Image (tube, helix red, strand yellow):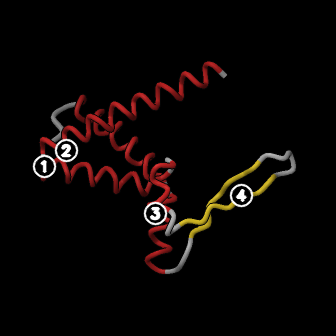
Amino acid sequence: MINGWFDFILLVFASFRLTRLIVYDKITRFIRQPFHKEVEEVDSNGDVITFIEIKGKGLRHWIGELLSCYWCTGIWCTAILIVVYLLWPVGGEVLIVLLAVAGAAGICEAILQRLID
């Protein structure tokens, strides 16, 4: 599957992007919504701080914890990408390259934003 450093780096960027998509991005909020409640509070400076509360007990709570942990979700996302690639090499390769390019572009954007600010 991984045939060298280039493939490994592609998998790293793809895993990064898929994990970020699931844990943080607004477009996948519907996945997290059954397990998380977003709570907003205003701090002493007047800034709005948003945090999550995990809903439910048992399996629901466990999934909520998983979806709130970047490290935990990252392991599962990487495993999913590897399994998809092994079961469907052509489609898995396209998915990995797509996510890797998006992940690298996101990192470039974050670096540029820091330089501009």
> From mark 1 to mark 2, how far is it between C-alphas?
6 Å
Which residue reaches farthest bottom? 58
For disc 1, the neighbor class at 10 Å (few under 14, some 14 to 19, many from 20) is few
Mark 1 or mark 3: which is in front?
Answer: 1
**Pick the front one: 58 or 9:** 58
Q: Amino acid at mark 2?
A: Gly
Q: Which residue is mark 3?
A: 66
| Side of 21 relative to 46 (left or right) | left
Residue 54, image x, y percentages: 57, 69
Q: Which residue is mark 4?
A: 40
> From mark 4 to mark 1, how far is it between C-alphas?
42 Å
Q: Amino acid at mark 3?
A: Leu
- Is 87 situated above or below 13? below
Q: Which residue is mark 1?
A: 88
Residue 92 numbered tag:
2
User: Along the polypeptide, which appears first: circle 2 or circle 4?
Assistant: 4
**Pick the front one: 19 or 8:** 19
Which residue reaches farthest right? 44
Q: Circle 3 sits in a helix, a strand or a loop, which is it?
A: helix
User: Along the polypeptide, which appears first: circle 3 or circle 2?
Assistant: 3
Residue lying at 13% horizontally and 49% vertically, measured from the top left:
88
Q: Locate the C terminus and report the quarter of the image it occupies.
A: top right
